[in-house]
Amino acid sequence: MTLFTDMCERVLGESIIGRAREAGKVDIRVTDIRDFAGNKHNKVDDMPYGGGMGMIMAAQPIYACYKSLYSEGEPKPHLIYMSPKGKTLTQQRVVELSKLDRIVILAGHYEGVDQRVIDEIVDEEISVGDYVLTGGELPALIIADAVCRMLPGVLSDDECFTEESHFNGLLEYPQYTRPAEWHGREVPPVLLSGNHAEINKWRKKESLLETKRRREDMFCKLSLTKEEQKLLNEAGSEKKQ
């Protein structure tokens, strides 16, 4: 639900998500809140009570827009409001959201949304980071992209996301492609060896090291297996050599 449908459609019509929509792997509908303004000027905002800068999106158009998305007797879709006051989005929450049948995302704009409609229909508020944007469209598109790529058939193989950063609480290992040497920098020999067991071991070790180096907050939450601790110890020994 947005005031800027063209902006959203342009993004959601491209690349992997666009192809998934065309193939019927995912159904994404962009709905214009202005269509439910209820006045001849399609006005959906007004001045805030108590004074202050900017305009506030009114409750009724948002409410009417949301109610149009499902029929009486149907289960209420899970409604997410994109807000800098919400909980920060994580990969774990993305996976959880991907298991829901229907999600509605409200992209606010201007100085915010009338609190009463948030209290009335919103199930959760989500933030994409500790900063403020001009509207909720970009954060809404982030959630749509992150959730849809978890759905069956959207990506070519589950490994496309199960081995990437954050999915298992680790950052992804470094990736390389041809040529084997570029600007004097060589691809790690193990990746050219054809030994898949050693390649997998190297990748797991690098994921552990990347997470420890870059995201101590994530690393502290890990419960390392004996094998993972062994890989870290090996990495430490290699650095001392």
Image (cartoon, rainbow, N blue to C red):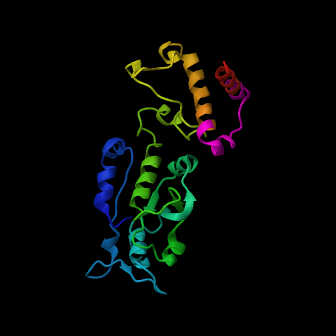
In the image, residue 9 lies in the stretch drawn in magenta: no
State the residue at coordinates (45%, 60%).
Answer: 104
Quadrant where the image shows the C terminus: top right
| Drawn side of residue 91 relative to residue 108, left or right | right
Judge left or right: residue 81 versus residue 207.
left
Which residues, given as a range, are shown in magenta? 213-231
Say whether residue 19 is visible.
no
From this view, report whether residue 75 is shown above or below residue 157.
below
Q: Main secondary structure of the magenta part?
A: helix
134 or 164, which lies in front?
Answer: 134
Q: Taking 7 as reference, is 55 above or below it?
A: below
Is 213 located above or below residue 123 in the figure?
above
Q: Position of residue 233 (x, y in %)?
A: 71, 25
Residue at the left extreme? 40
Q: Is residue 93 visible?
A: yes
Report the quarter where the N terminus lies. bottom left
Viewer-closest of 202 and 200: 202
Give how far across and how far down residue 144 sits, in percent.
43, 52
Residue at image position (53%, 13%) is 195
Q: Quadrant of residue 3?
A: bottom left
For the point 30% across and 58% down, the residue is: 7
**Magenta span includes 215:** yes
- Give percent across and percent down for residue 197: 58, 17
Whether residue 200 is situated above or below residue 165 in the rendered picture: above
